[in-house]
Image (cartoon, rainbow, N blue to C red):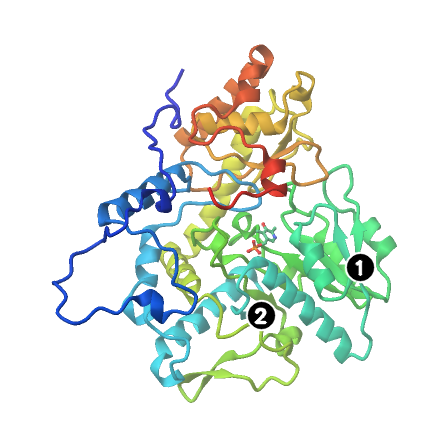
Amino acid sequence: MTEMPGTTGLLINEPLLWKKGRKGRSGFSIPKQDIPSYPLEEALTYGGPDFPDLCEVDVVRHYTRLSQWNFGVDTGMYPLGSCTMKYNPKTNERQAALPGFALAHPLLPEELCQGVLELIFHLQHYLAEITGMDAVSLQPAAGAQGEFSGMLIIHAFHRKKGAPRSKILIPDTAHGTNPASATLCGYRCVPVKSSERGIIAHETVASLMDDQTAGIMVTNPNTLGLFENNIIKIAKIVHEKGGIVYCDGANMNALMGIVNMGSIGIDVLHLNLHKTFSTPHGGGGPGAGPVCVRKDLEPFLPVPRIVLENGRFILSEQFPDSIGKLHAFYGNVGVMIKAYSYILSMGPDSLKKASQLAVLNANYIKEKLKDLFFLPHDVRCMHECVFSDEHQRKLKVTTLDIVKRLMDFGFHPPTIYFPLVVDGAMMIEPTETESKENLDLFIEAMRTIAGEAEIHPERLKDAPTRCKVKRLDEVAAARKPCLSG
Ligand SMILES: *Cc1c(COP(=O)(O)O)cnc(C)c1O
């Protein structure tokens, strides 16, 4: 068999630092003391922190070993559906680390951070152009906060008209954060069942939309990796009833330079810079979830906004209809710098090409695996494809077993058991940054696993066997977390 990336490795055990420490060891030598000593512990009423004493090599090895237990997109393919774990070119990190940016303190007066403000100002324009929306705020610090800001904007819009509304339509193929954001904003979520084709039928929206419904929150492409083909008709229905169309654009990696969100009827959209526009993520942050709006919703954008006044960039709060401030300062500026660097280094043609390749790669995997894994929607997909364990379940092998085995072959598992509308889902998003050779290795690993399910199902039950950590009891880990090692 072809040699898989995950088949060999020297992974070294490593205890907690407290087990390695020895009293009196230190990371550096200091000159002999020539003043009277004063024990630090006595100065601290609580007795001082319990830090282990370690020499430099212990500390370096500790963190290097731990880093080798980790898996990231720099180690291998990370086909996590609904998450766009693409490779992030290092030049973007380098630009964000330039001292003028990296050392800029958020409390600097405007005249001393004109460069950062100018960059954010231009990035807003680029994002408006890429999405076809009119105005952008880069303040939200995550996709979910972008959604929440969008909900607040929709709420403020209806309130300003003197007719607040109470409900919002959310399809069953929406991302899980969508109902959470809408609920947090006080809306009651009305589920919209997708059709047997995996997309929303406009007739269903028409039957649910009324004058108490603030609008619809669509994830497009949706979590089945399908483009909502009826979006123009859906937007028309929602608009005719005075509602607003929100689009979760975290999956923009499928559409850059291809779909103009403004012209298909989207009024409010959020993006995930940390997915589409090249910031490493997966450890929980930092991120940026800019919210983009059409012209007449611009007054509601969060403040401060960056305004160009007499040739200078200022942070202005002079927007009386604004939903207000989302947090201290201006969001995760480092992520914005990386996105700016990414957009400029790619240019419009390459951004479009990136989306085309992301879609091509997902379709390639879909076609190469659909004879062995059940494909609930056998149509052309966007940037991700969703399989299920329906065939393997008959052999008592589940999605969890399949993806655990994938780790033995050196691949990060895809997103599993999501979207909820597919039983035992495996949601695979290869992204445009994987070569055909890598995709072929992944496909071969999946095909090998499908074969093992037939003849050696026990191999899958024990998997992973080659990883540092073997099969975990995930229920116990969640219910009885052991945080002390
Ligand atoms: C990732 C994602 C989100 C949430 O983004 P966070 O930055 O994790 O808050 C929302 N919607 C979709 C479709 C996503 O893929």
Q: Marks 2/1: CA distance? A: 22 Å
Residue depicted at 47% across the width and 22% down the height = 444
**In the visual, does 101 lie left or right of 134?**
left
- Which residue, as the protein is rendered here, is positioned at the far top? 455
Left or right side of 399 for 433? left
Beta carbon at label 1 within 8 Å of ligand 1: no
Q: Quadrant of residue 153?
A: bottom right
The local secondary structure at tag 1 comes to helix
Left or right side of 289 for 70: left
Q: Circle 1: is it few (<14), some (14-19), or many (20+) Cα within 10 Å? A: many
Where is residue 306 drawn, in percent x and y? 48, 78
Which label is found at residue 46? none
Frontmost residue, 154 versus 228: 154
Which residue lies at the image location 58% right of the left edge and 42% below the top edge? 382
**For residue 323, which quarter of the picture?**
bottom right
Inspect this view and state whether residue 377 appears: yes
- Residue matched to label 1: 237
Across and down, in percent, residue 383 comes to: 55, 42
Q: Is mark 2 within 8 Å of ligand 1?
A: no
Would you name the residue on which mark 2 appears?
Answer: 134
Three-letter residue code for mark 2: Asp
Q: Quadrant of the N terminus?
A: top left
Position of 380 relative to 305 (above/below): above
Q: Position of residue 159 (x, y in %)?
A: 77, 77
